Amino acid sequence: MKTGRRIVILTASFGAGHFKAAQAVEQALKQDNTAVQTRMIDSFTTTAPRLTRAVIGLYLNILANVPSLYGMFYKWGNHAKTALLGRSLMSVSLAVSTDNQLAEFSPQSIICTHASPTGAICQLKRQGKLAVPVIAAITDFVVHRFWIYDEVDLYTVMHEETARGLLAAGVARDKIQVVGIPIAAKFNVSLPKAEMRRKLGLAVDIPAVLVMGGGTGALPMDSIVAEFNRCKIPLQLLVVAGRNEPLRRRLKEISSLNALHVFGFVDNIHELMGAADLLVTKPGGLSAAEALAMGLPMILFRPIPGQEEGNAQFLAEAGVACCVRGLGELVPTAENLLQNPVQWDMMRCKARKLAKPHAAQAVASFALSLCEKSR
């Protein structure tokens, strides 16, 4: 293998999924390529940290309290002509700081896991300041217009349905590779359920429901845990609060009729998924791709208008998830799946079939190949 290959991975702090996808690709690049140099850049954080924190705070508040407003912005961005002006202004703004950081590293290929840095890179290419190949790794099951740029050399997507969205937007077929959403290699490990439950201190013979996605305030975790008290079958609940320490403390104080296991920030989500029978979560692209790789049926709770609705519709139509809009639907849906092993096993098998656990390795391989074009 030739030495000295330098690859930049550009991501953004809006949602953990984009960052996790970037980490997965970086891990894949380094796994068997010790001569490869990588640099991961969070475009927003490095450009304007204070502004980024304020914007992320506003973004999370909107998602938690007025999700319909986010849906309106998403739809506006996907259809209104004026939205393209805002996209251009964002790209120009990010391009300045991005150019400075790239100059220090002199990459031979670039991977983007968020639409905004993709725009910044394409702006630099239009200005003639950059001439290296660019890969846009789309991290949802649907495509937003803000990802679409003529200057992107290669798009990697989850499914043929995602590819059709790019084709409809005018992207050439030879620029699209259906490889999946990049996830960490640990989600490609077969984990015996009984073994994982014993390792985590769980009962081996009682159904387990994993609840996650509430660390940012997007899910009403307290209400979900309380709602499961209505369940007519024995359960053990595995609830992940993430870095939300106040939420973790509240959950620990909830009186639950089920065995309740509350976790803060963890790095073994693959083990929790391996121990669970069902996942209750928001339909984020990364968490859904991870669950598919683990063969874990999903209950998708109140998908936010926008990419989450698109993800949820795709997953429901694929037969790997059920969507619920309100708390009252949650327990009956869980009971139905847990008491119907034939349906549950069918969902599990469909999830395994739909999964693409090697996506990060595929994206890394494309990036290494494209390095040759910039030599």
Image: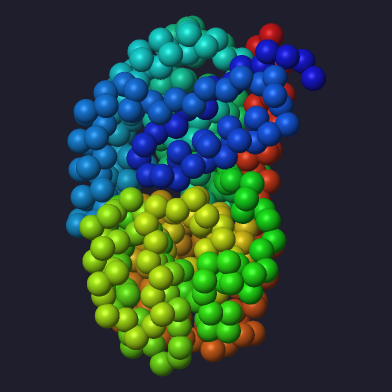
Q: Is residue 141 above or below residue 301?
A: above
Q: Is residue 148 above or below residue 276?
A: above
The residue nearer to you, when weighing 82 against 310, is: 310
Residue 80 horizontal/vertical position (percent):
30, 39
Q: Specify the quadrant of the image occupied by residue 42.
A: top left
Q: Quadrant of the C terminus?
A: top right
The residue nearer to you, when weighing 84 against 311, is: 311
The residue nearer to you, when weighing 93 against 28, is: 28
Q: Residue at x 45, y 83 (%)?
A: 235
The residue nearer to you, when weighing 124 against 336, is: 336
Q: Residue at x 32, y 81 (%)?
A: 256
State whether residue 221 appears in this view. Answer: yes
Q: Residue at x 45, y 53 (%)?
A: 266
Residue 198 horizontal/vertical position (percent):
59, 72
Q: Residue at x 39, y 88 (%)?
A: 231
Q: Specify the quadrant of the image occupied by residue 249.
A: bottom left
